[in-house]
Amino acid sequence: MELLDFEGQSVLDSRDVAKMIGKEHKNLMRDIRTYIKDIEESSNLSSRQFFIPSTYTSKQGKVLPNYLLTKQGCEFVANKMTGKKGNQFTAQYVSLFNSMKKQISNPTEKIYEMFPQTPRNFPQALRALADSQEQLAKQKPKVDYYDSQMRNPGLMTSTEIAKDYGWSARTLHKELQKRHILYKQGKHWVLYQKYADKGYTQYEPYDFQKSNGQHGVHNNLKWTQKGKKFIYDLLAKDGIHPILEQMNLLEME
């Protein structure tokens, strides 16, 4: 059970919520649709503050509907429940959301999580982190790609990063999905919550024209230079290197 990130917002999948409250997913979906109908009757409220329509792919390859529940959405569901199950669900979702809030507000805890055997002494943790980075640097081939490409300023699309490897954006996304970095949310790719607050990506809005002539806005996922380095290090561990680096490695042999 883990929180997901949707456009910078922590959410829970309705399938997970159904398991938490001991209800069949189809029945929870029915209830949520009723809640949405009631909410939308008030012009001052948006149901997306509580329940975000989404889809998922079943084991049979079918695309099926589900919802993403914000913290407010979880509160809404909990308020409809009574007894032991309601109390247990409230305790679980409150613990999940509060845990994420604590991680964001206290980033030094992440260092201690990375080095559980290190005494809770900040300088020692920093030394361990520095040793780890030094080891990675020794393993990395000394080629021009890292210096010339990693220092390019600005945001990059997945297509631009994928081209360095001779891939399409789709291939890159599939590789990251396989490593549980990204997942498909409707038509968009988004980061799992554990990577969402590390500064790897930003959402860049862009306008588009609908078939009826009206304008809409989509959020386009783009990678920061920190994110590009994260992808580089991740793939390099599996022996996957950019084309330019592969050429340099061949020349060094």
Image: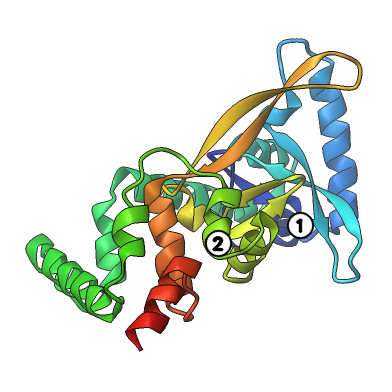
Eyeballing the image, is 74 above or below 133?
A: above
Q: Which mark is residue 137?
A: none
Looking at the rendering, in which quadrant would you find the C terminus? bottom left
Horizontally, residue 216 falls left or right of residue 116, namely right
Marks 1 and 2 sit apart, C-alpha to C-alpha, by 20 Å
Which residue type carries mark 2?
Ile
Q: Which residue is mark 1?
A: 15
Indicate which disc, 1 or 2, sits on the residue closer to the N terminus: 1
Depth check, mark 1 against mark 2: the one in front is 2
Looking at the image, which residue sits at the far left? 123
Q: Residues within 10 Å of mark 2 (few under 14, many from 20)?
A: some
What residue is rendered at 65% in x and 42% in y? 74
Q: Quadrant of residue 105?
A: top left
What residue is rendered at 53% in x and 42% in y? 222
Q: Secondary structure at mark 1?
A: helix
Marks 1 & 2, CB-CB < 8 Å contact? no
- Residue 27: image location, x then y, percent: 89, 51
Q: Observer-nearest residue: 98 or 87?
A: 98
Q: Which residue is mark 2?
A: 181
- Residue 226: image location, x then y, percent: 37, 51
Q: Observer-nearest residue: 38 or 100?
A: 100
Whether residue 222 can be seen here: yes
Looking at the image, which residue sits at the far top? 43
Eyeballing the image, is 219 above or below 130?
A: above
Whether residue 120 can be seen here: no
Horizontally, residue 188 falls left or right of residue 146, namely right
Which residue type carries mark 1?
Arg
Q: Residues within 10 Å of mark 1 (few under 14, many from 20)?
A: some
Q: Observer-nearest residue: 206 or 252?
A: 252
What residue is rendered at 55% in x and 36% in y? 203
Eyeballing the image, is 72 above or below 58?
A: above
- Residue 160: image location, x then y, percent: 55, 49
